[in-house]
Every structure is written in structure tokens, then in C-alpha cells.
Amino acid sequence: MAGFVMRKNQRLKKLVPVRYLGGRLAGEGIISDLSLSGSYVIGNVPVQVGMYLSLQIFVPGDQEPLMIDRAVVKWVKKGEFGVDFGTPDPKVVEQITRVISALAKQQYGSSGNGSGNPTNA
């Protein structure tokens, strides 16, 4: 299987609203592929590789947004870009894990294995 790369963290494909801020930049968009290490964003304001952004992720059902204080832009393709969270604070890791688990249960809960837990990839 040449070219096949295993992901180190589970990724969730569900779309979630996000606001991103960096310097004088403020944009909004949709997060996809949320994981403990980063995510993929479709945004309305252009960013550049290497920029540091703070993210406010608006999880359905949560009163407060999930806050990622420092995410670095790793790649850009038109209005889409990937961010890496680096090594987030343990509290943030716990929050991301909770969000991924809750959204995964919504997305996969009614399918098949009865546990509601997707497998790690």
C-alpha cells in the first residue's frame, strides 16, 4: 500500500462553525476533520502559511465555544487551510476529546456496533 499514511489521531468529519483571529485578521468558517492535533478549515478570510491563529469552535449544544489559543496555519488552498494545534494545554486536550466523542456519538451512534465509539485510525 504505497502512499498510505496512518493518522496518529482520530479525525471527525462533522462540520462545526469556527471563528478565527490572528493579528488584525478576523474570519469565520467551518471546521472539518477535527482532531487532537489540528483541523481543516473552510474560511471566508484568507490566511497565510505560518500565521498563528486563535480559534473559537462553536460546538452544537455547548454554551461556550471551545477555545484554541494558538494554532499555526500549515497549508492554504484558496479559502481552505489546515491548522496544527501543536501541544495544547491538557484542559484543551480534554475539551477536544469530549467534543470529538460527543460529535462522534451523534454521527455514528445509530450505526452498527452498538457501542457508539468509532475506531481510531
Image (cartoon, helix red, strand yellow):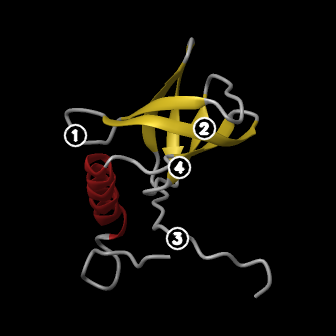
Numbered disc 1: secondary structure: loop
- In the image, residue 58 lies at what x, y percent? 35, 36
Disc 4: which residue: 39
What kind of residue is marked 2?
Answer: Ile
Q: CA distance from mark 1 to mark 3?
A: 27 Å
Direction from residue 100 to residue 63 in the image, left or right: left
Disc 1: which residue: 62
What kind of residue is marked 3?
Answer: Lys
Are there few (<14), some (14-19), or many (20+) residues within 10 Å of tag 2?
many
Q: Is residue 64 above or below residue 75?
A: above
Residue shown at 71% from the left, 35% from the top? 49
Direction from residue 29 to residue 5 in the image, left or right: right
Disc 2: which residue: 42
What kind of residue is marked 4?
Answer: Ser
Mark 3 vs 4: CB contact within 8 A: no
Are there few (<14), some (14-19), or many (20+) residues within 10 Å of tag 1?
few
Q: Name which of mark 4 and mark 1 comes first in the sequence.
A: 4
Q: CA distance from mark 1 to mark 2?
A: 21 Å
Q: Quadrant of the N terminus?
A: bottom right
Disc ID at residue 114? none
Are there few (<14), some (14-19), or many (20+) residues within 10 Å of tag 4?
many
Numbered disc 2: secondary structure: strand
Residue shown at 48% from the left, 62% from the top? 11
Mark 3 vs 2: CB contact within 8 A: no
Disc 3: which residue: 8
Q: Name which of mark 3 and mark 4 comes first in the sequence.
A: 3
Q: CA distance from mark 2 to mark 4?
A: 10 Å
Q: Depth-wise, is mark 3 or mark 4 nearer the camera?
A: 3
